[in-house]
Amino acid sequence: MNLSFPYGFDLSGRTQLSDLPRHIEDMVELVLLTSPGERVNRPTFGSGAAQLVFAPNSDTLAAALQQIIKAGLQQWLSDLIQVQSVQVDNNDSTLLITVQYTVIQTQQPQTSEFVFGAGAP
């Protein structure tokens, strides 16, 4: 069952579902935004990337985030996706994270972008 994120209910009162590509993109975002220690039953879940968003923006931070995010995605979503690349671009006070991956079940390539910082919508 692919629950939509954030959780919600449809007009009939049932939990909203999402299609597989959207569900996987939601899961990628959860790995990015969750810090280790936040989940009681999975204390090592997440990438810790959200903690570094408030660090001084630099090329070094972008390179570190690239490695942290790729490792987190491979650890937690390797049964669903094959990570092709993770790119982190820093521009002033904004981080743009681009994740390219292949959905294992369908073999479809996907690209997801996430913006953190002052330029975020």
Image (spheres, rainbow, N blue to C red):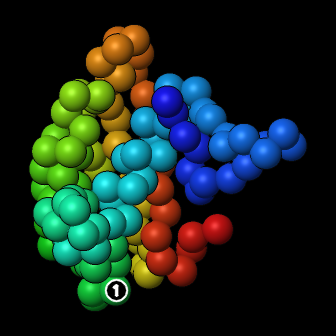
**Above or below 44: residue 98:** above
Give 13 or 104, whichever is nearer the viewer: 13
Question: Would residue 3 be found to the left or right of residue 29 on screen?
Answer: right
Q: Residue at x 43, y 36 (%)?
A: 24
Quarter of the view holding residue 112: top left
Residue matched to label 1: 54
The picture places residue 95, in percent across and down from the top left corner, at: 40, 68
Rate crowding at label 1 as few (under 14), some (14 to 19) or many (20 or more) other CA atoms within 10 Å. Answer: few
Q: Residue at x 33, y 59 (%)?
A: 32
Question: Would residue 90 be found to the left or right of residue 46 on screen?
Answer: right
Quick one: which residue is furthest to the right in this view? 11
Question: Would residue 27 be found to the left or right of residue 73 on screen?
Answer: right
**Above or below 95: residue 10:** above
Quarter of the view holding residue 52: bottom left
Residue 82 visible to the viewer: yes
The type of residue carrying mark 1 is Phe
Give 39 or 25, whichever is nearer the viewer: 39
**Above or below 98: residue 56:** below
The picture places residue 54, in percent across and down from the top left corner, at: 34, 86
Q: Residue at x 51, y 33 (%)?
A: 2
In the rendered image, the quadrant that contains the C terminus is: bottom right
